[in-house]
Amino acid sequence: MIIEKIHINEIIGGRYDNSFVLYHHRISSYKYPLCPFYKLLITKPQYGSGEAGIPRDNNNSPRYIRITDIDENGSLINSVGVTAKNIEEKYILNDNDILIARSGNTVGKSYIHKSKMVDEPCFFAGYLIRFVVDQNIISPDYIFIFTKLSVFNDWVKVTQRVTGQPNINAEEYSNLLIPIPPVKIQKEIVEIYSKAQKERSNKKQEAESITNTIDTFILKELGISFSHDIKKISSYKLSISSILGQRYDTYYHQPYFEEAFSKLLSSHYPTKSLRDISLVITSGITPKSGGSDYSNQTEGIPFIRSGDIDINGDIDFDNLLYITQSIHNTKMKSSKVMKNDIMIAIVGATIGQIGIYLSDREANINQAIALVRLKTGINPEYVKEILQSSIGQLNLDRLKRPVARANINLEEVASIMIPIPDINKQNEIVNKIKAIRLQAKQLQQEGDALLEETKKHIEKMIIG
């Protein structure tokens, strides 16, 4: 049993909960003097915009930085992202501004803005707080690195209020005690961390290059020759007879999409619609917001929304909403997910994202997901890979309605065509893709491990 003696003077005027007091007692023995965060800032912390995100029309429009746009290491996720209808100047980010998440399961997630790393102006959302560091006192990069260390994560754990949604407000962040090493040591820490980040980035790029070979492999295996350089054009002619019984909008009939669809049908293998190879094609519902329909992670049933399907198709159970068992058994009967079900995002910004449910846990989906349960003799991982491929994504993209909230209906999902080789060939393709992904994953893990070791080394430099 470990006993720590804490003098009453250490807690007078502060919080009295055990973990909070113990944390602050331990940091009192750090190698360098501690300074409250607010003394290192040139302005008061600022909460972000409350605007709703909307799709970006092009890569030059301002990007709206939300918590979900930042990865676990504080880098912007490589995607088009969103913008907003109203963009106020006061929320535009400047070089070396630091953003920290203030609520939810990602409370404490941080990002430092580097103008040279982005091509467009950026502004930030309301669940993030901006901190502008006085660079005459301390290095912004050092502060950002500190927020990536386990000691900061420990502070987040003891500081956040866990009643309802986890939360740390601007005042609490302002009182964060930060060890201040000499400028020389700060620079050394930044150099060490930057070197590790660069090496991790190189590993990640190598992994991405390997992963990118999957699409070429799939097209070759299907016998499809398709140029990704075909340009969408704004004007073209269609005969009435060619579109009878189909959608009449020009978006659907763009030559680019027509070419992709015809190439899919030219595969080595016979093509079948999802309707022909599926037992069930359905979508879910969403329980009423708040109240008794929702539960907690230990007692409830996972509730999967389209935004919960990540770019690799994986599900992070730790960051899901949970519904009660009774709601799952009554209101949600039609939206239950089974192992090996394919999930396709059919509404909003994540439209076209594909996942496969590989867990034995009971779960539900919402109405923004199409659930596809395949017949025996069809490998669901094979179908998922076809849908995720460039040719599959183009044919999904063709189906969506380019309105304010893009969507694809279930009838259109059922019409999606898939080349179907025999099951042995399906399995062969899947196993080859798994091997490619495993090689890429190993490279990413090497980069992640290097960065984690660097963080531990930096922590020892700071704490002593």
Image: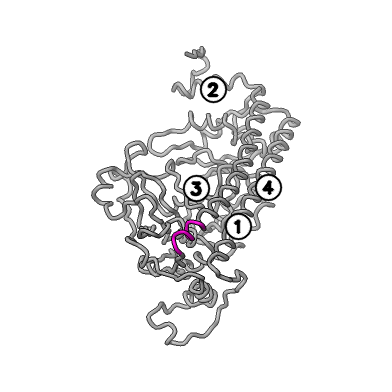
Say which label, 4 or 2, has the lower sequence index.
Answer: 2
Residue tagged by mark 1?
A: 212
Label 2, secondary structure: give it.
Answer: helix
Q: Identify which amino acid the numbered label 4 is placed on.
A: Asn
Q: How many marks?
A: 4
Q: Is 316 positioned to the left or the right of 435 in the image?
A: left
What is the C-alpha distance between the residues marked 4 and 2? 38 Å
- Work out whether residue 353 can be spotted: no
Label 1, secondary structure: give it.
Answer: helix
The stretch of residues the image draws in magenta is 422-428
Figure quadrant of residue 46: top right
Residue tagged by mark 2?
A: 24
Residue tagged by mark 4?
A: 202
Using the image, tell me which numbered label, if any, was put on residue 126: 3
Residue furthest toward the right?
Answer: 184
Say which label, 1 or 2, has the lower sequence index.
Answer: 2
Nearest to the observer: residue 314 or residue 27: 314
Mark nearest the camera among 2 and 3 is 2
Q: Identify which amino acid the numbered label 2 is placed on.
A: His
Nearest to the observer: residue 403 or residue 449: 449
Label 3, secondary structure: give it.
Answer: loop
Q: Identify which amino acid the numbered label 1 is placed on.
A: Asn
Q: Is 149 positioned to the left or the right of 381 in the image?
A: right
What is the C-alpha distance between the residues marked 2 and 3? 29 Å
Mark nearest the camera among 1 and 4 is 1
Mark nearest the camera among 1 and 2 is 1
Q: Is residue 427 magenta?
A: yes
Q: Is residue 366 magenta?
A: no
Q: Identify which amino acid the numbered label 3 is placed on.
A: Gly
